[in-house]
C-alpha cells in the first residue's frame, strides 16, 4: 500500500481518542539514524496561523535528542493491529537496542524525514517552539506529585503540520 498526501483540512478524526487511546509514534532523525517513541499526550490545533500539533517529551527520552537535533519530525498513527509494536516503542530505549526492528516496524522517508510504512496516517511536521515545563506553572500541585515525582518535567514542542500522508 502507498501513501497519498491529503490536505490537513480533509482530516476527520477525534484527537482525544486518536492520541490518548490509539497513541502515536513521534519519530525524528535521518536516513542514517532515527529513533521513535510512543506518546499518548498531545494536542492538535491552530497557532500563529499554522496548523499545529503539540507534543510532550520527557528529558530522559532518547528520542528527544533526535527531535532536538532536527528541524522536522513525524507523528505516525498505526492501526490497532500494531498495539504490541507501540508498547515496545514506549518501553524499550533505542539507546539500548534496536527497538524499531524488535517492534517489526519499517522505516520510510519523506524528503529524508523518517516515518513508518505500517502507519495509517502520518503528519510531517516542522518544529516552531520548545519549552521545558516548570513546577511553578502547575496550577494544580497534585500534578507535580502524580506525574513528576522525579521532577522530570516534559518539554513541550509545538510543530507545524506541513504535510499529512494517508495510507491508500
Image: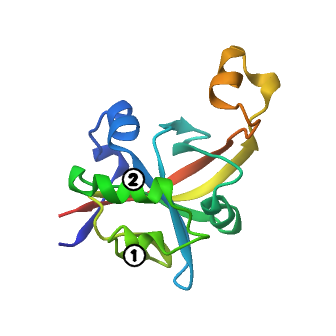
Q: Quadrant of the C terminus?
A: bottom left
Whether residue 27 is visible: yes
- The number of callouts visible is 2
Residue 91: % across, % down: 49, 54
Residue 147: which disc? none
Q: In which quarter of the image is the N terminus?
A: bottom left
Residue at 34 percent of width and 39 percent of height: 18
For mark 2, does the 10 Å Cα neighbourhood hold few (<14), some (14 to 19), or many (20 or more) residues? Answer: some
Please identify the residue farthest to the bottom as the structure is shown: 32
Question: In this rendering, is residue 22 above or below 87?
Answer: above
Earlier in the chain: of badge 2 and badge 1, it is: 2
Nearest the camera: 71 or 139?
A: 139
Question: In this rendering, is residue 32 above or below 59?
Answer: below
Residue at 58 percent of width and 64 percent of height: 72
Nearest the camera: 92 or 135?
A: 92
Disc 2 to disc 1, C-alpha distance: 13 Å
Left or right: 71 as drawn, with respect to 135: left
Question: In this rendering, is residue 93 above or below 42?
Answer: below
Do residues under tags 2 and 1 come within 8 Å of each other at their CB atoms? Answer: no
Q: Which residue is tagged 2? A: 87
Secondary structure under badge 2? helix
The quadrant holding residue 50 is top right
Question: In this rendering, is residue 137 above or below 39?
Answer: above
Residue 105: % across, % down: 34, 71
Left or right: 50 as drawn, with respect to 24: right
Residue 84: % across, % down: 31, 55
Secondary structure under badge 1? helix
Residue 101: which disc? 1
Amino acid at each position: 500500500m502507498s501513501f497519498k498526501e491529503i490536505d490537513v483540512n480533509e482530516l476527520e478524526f477525534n484527537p482525544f481518542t486518536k492520541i490518548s487511546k490509539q497513541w502515536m509514534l513521534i519519530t525524528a532523525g535521518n536516513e542514517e539514524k532515527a529513533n521513535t517513541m510512543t506518546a499518548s499526550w498531545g494536542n492538535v490545533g491552530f497557532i500563529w496561523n499554522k496548523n499545529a500539533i503539540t507534543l510532550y517529551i520527557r528529558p530522559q527520552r532518547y528520542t528527544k535528542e533526535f527531535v532536538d537535533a532536527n528541524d522536522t519530525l513525524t507523528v505516525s498513527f498505526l492501526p490497532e493491529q500494531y498495539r504490541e509494536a507501540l508498547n515496545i516503542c514506549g518501553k524499550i530505549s533505542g539507546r539500548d537496542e534496536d527497538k524499531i526492528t524488535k517492534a517489526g516496524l519499517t522505516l520510510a522517508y519523506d524528503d529524508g524525514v523518517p516515518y513508518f510504512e505500517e502507519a495509517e496516517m502520518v503528519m510531517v511536521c516542522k518544529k516552531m517552539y520548545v519549552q521545558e515545563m516548570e513546577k511553578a506553572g502547575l496550577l494544580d500541585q497534585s500534578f507535580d506529585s502524580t506525574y513528576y515525582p522525579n521532577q522530570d518535567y516534559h518539554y513541550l514542542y509545538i510543530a507545524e503540520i506541513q504535510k499529512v500522508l494517508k495510507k491508500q
